[in-house]
Image (cartoon, rainbow, N blue to C red):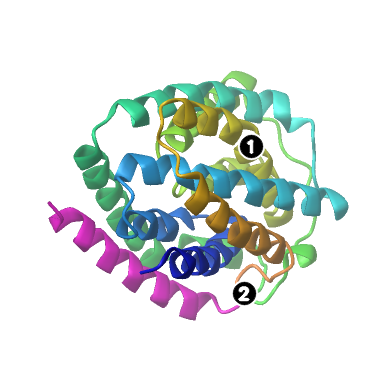
Amino acid sequence: MSDLAAYFLLFLAGSVAGTINVLAGGGSFLTLPLLIFLGLPPTVANGTNRIAILVQNVGAVWSFNRHGVMDWRWIRTAALPALAGAGLGTWAAIRIGDASFQRVLATLMIVFAVVMLLDPLRSRIRRGGVSEGATLADSPPETPSRLSGIAFSASFFGVGVYGGFVQAGVGFFILALAMLAGFDLVRGNALKVLVVLVFTPLALVLFAVAGKVDWGMGIALAGGNLLGGLIGTHLTVLKGHAWVKRVVVVMIVVFALKLWIAP
């Protein structure tokens, strides 16, 4: 495959992944395997993917803020603990070997496929009385309830460790914590992109210093992720959910099996 074709494929994949990431999470389960299949070592793919994540969340934070749903007060209690955890997680990701990281990624992808099949997001929406066709803007705003400050911050430190290590699927953990804090879908997704935006630059710098970033592929992927991130702030939460779920699950299982059996 020529470089031009590879960059175009990355842009398309980034557009899909960016949309998925902003609406819920897990888009990196598509882009990481693609980067690996295009020839990058797994740990370099992990670092390269952070360029796209950074650009995507810059656009998403700007868009959520423009819609008036970004609450900057949560930087101190959520984003900063995640930043501290991301440093530890990124250090571990850089130290781990390519083969080991590939096995870890394959295992996480299988777990993610099972979660997609169980579809907890749809169940949560139904329990909350929000229809599957409701848009983000239709979600009624709620005042976040106060959790224990220490427990809340410690949870986001753990989120940062995971996000620094692999990034893929971190959005689901953030949405779960946002749910417990009383956020609706609009503010939960806004909190998610804010937290990821805060810790991603540190992860990217650490990967770059270690020589584990392919800037050409990363920039091509980032262009798509930026577009997808902007689209994701406007799409309905569950539009086409059942169809997307089936496609994503099949792709994840295929990619995971290929990663697992690859030498």
Q: Nearer the viewer, residue 99 or 238?
A: 99
Give the mark nearest the N terminus, 2 or 1.
Answer: 2
Q: Which residue is mark 2?
A: 132
Q: Which residue is mark 1?
A: 195
Which residue does the image show at 45% across and 44% down from the upper left?
A: 214
Point out residue 231 in the picture as x, y percentages from the top left corner: 69, 66
Decide whether the magenta segment is chiefly helix, strand or loop.
helix
10 Å crowding of disc 1: few (<14), some (14-19), many (20+)? many
Which residues are drawn in magenta?
239-263
Point out residue 108 in the picture as x, y percentages from the top left corner: 31, 49
Is 133 one of the magenta-colored residues? no
Is 242 one of the magenta-colored residues? yes
Q: Secondary structure at mark 1?
A: helix
Point out residue 13 in the picture as x, y percentages from the top left corner: 50, 66
Note whether 50 is above or below 209 in the view shown. below
Viewer-nearest of labels 2 and 1? 1
Q: Secondary structure at mark 2?
A: loop
Which residue does the image show at 44% across and 72% down from the upper left?
A: 245
Whether residue 158 is visible: no
Whether residue 215 is visible: yes
10 Å crowding of disc 2: few (<14), some (14-19), many (20+)? some
